[in-house]
Image (tube, rainbow, N blue to C red):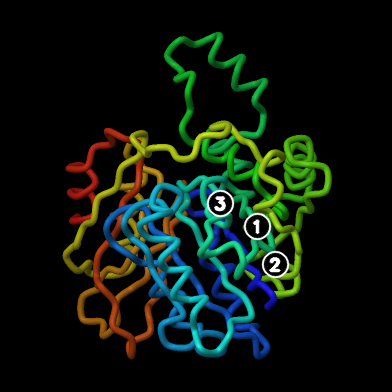
Amino acid sequence: MSRVPVTVLTGFLGAGKTTLLRSLLTQADGRRIAVIVNEFGDAGFDGGLVEECAAKACAPGDIVELTNGCICCTVADDFVPTMEKLLSRERPLDAIVIETSGLALPQPLLKAFAWPAVKTRATVDGVVTVVDALALSEGRITLDEHALAEQRAADEGIDHDDPIEEVFEDQLACADLVVLSKSDLVSAEQLAEIEAKLKAELRANVGIVRSKGDLAPTVLIGLNAAAEDDMAARVGHHGEEEEHDHDDFDSIVIKPTAAADLDTMRARVSDALGLEGVLRVKGHARIADKPAPIVVQAVGARVDLAFARPDVSHPEHLVVIGLKGFDADAARKALAG
């Protein structure tokens, strides 16, 4: 029996993984695709966004959201049992897509495909790493390790272990394809420079494609990488470690009061993002006198707000993710207005 191809969709917080996944599902062209969405923290959000546009590709129960921690650290408890259930469906799947948390390392997840319950029935068709071109152009993530080393040597206050760069390095080391997201927000000169730096970091045969948020499924599925058989070439910062902790990051869940209008909510979210150590804000919030909540997607200095579908139930909360020790009380106050 042929093994089900699995695409691992990884990338740092706010890179655009869910947007890309939604686009893929709306262009399924008759393929039956199951989806595993992993969230950092206790509250889900991305799974609901995926379900809204999955009717063409997914049957009931084919979208599974895991919110018990990063999937790389919950392989035995969450990932393997979920895969067993999906692979045991009466109607065979054409593909599975796993959207990892933005803080997850792909390597421990790939090793799980050697587990007896999985290895004869599924293979990693490819690891697709989504890289935020805007974040790179703004210096929120860096590809210039030499420059970073010089900064650390000149300023003892700069942390020698940057948890963001470590996660990003591991996600790049595992890639079979890099999707350079938000490419329409960066100049052609900056894009060319970013691509040159990426090529210097990536393995020789790893391709780079630019994206504004949508790509044809044939670009993402059908890489035939069998990535689980090639682990030695995918060693990142954490080396051969089977797992890692996430003590460098933290998250909180907030249920904000309704804002008077979109501009007021935008200002609240911007204030929260401006706090030291805050990396990401996402979720649903309420605008006074409006029948549907708004979808909040915010990273860096960018805040995107859009009204959600009124016919779908949405848990109204915002998830704030940041470096360990960020001021959670200040974030709550900012989002409360």
Q: Are marks 3 and 2 in contact (CB under 8 Å)?
A: no
Q: CA distance from mark 1 to mark 3?
A: 8 Å
Q: Which quarter of the figure has residue 326?
A: top left
Provide the secondary structure element on which disc 3 rests.
Answer: loop
Report the amino acid beneath label 2: Leu
Q: Residues within 10 Å of mark 2 (few under 14, many from 20)?
A: many
Tell which of 55 and 239 is nearer to you. 239
Q: Is residue 127 left or right of residue 258?
A: right
Instruction: Give the residue at x 78% y 50%.
Output: 206
Provide the secondary structure element on which disc 2 rests.
Answer: helix
Is tag 3's residue or tag 2's residue first in the polypeptide sequence? 3
Quadrant (top left/top right/bottom left/bottom right) for the N terminus: bottom right
Which disc, if any, is residue 220?
Answer: 2
* Up-down relation of residue 292 to residue 251 (above or below): below
Q: Are marks 2 and 1 in contact (CB under 8 Å)?
A: yes
Q: Which residue is mark 1?
A: 128
Horizontal and vertical percent for residue 153? 56, 9
Which disc, if any, is residue 11?
Answer: 3
Report the amino acid beneath label 3: Gly
Horizontal and vertical percent for residue 164? 49, 36
Instruction: Give the residue at x 51% y 89%.
Output: 90
**How many marks on residues?**
3
Instruction: Give the residue at x 45% y 54%.
Output: 101
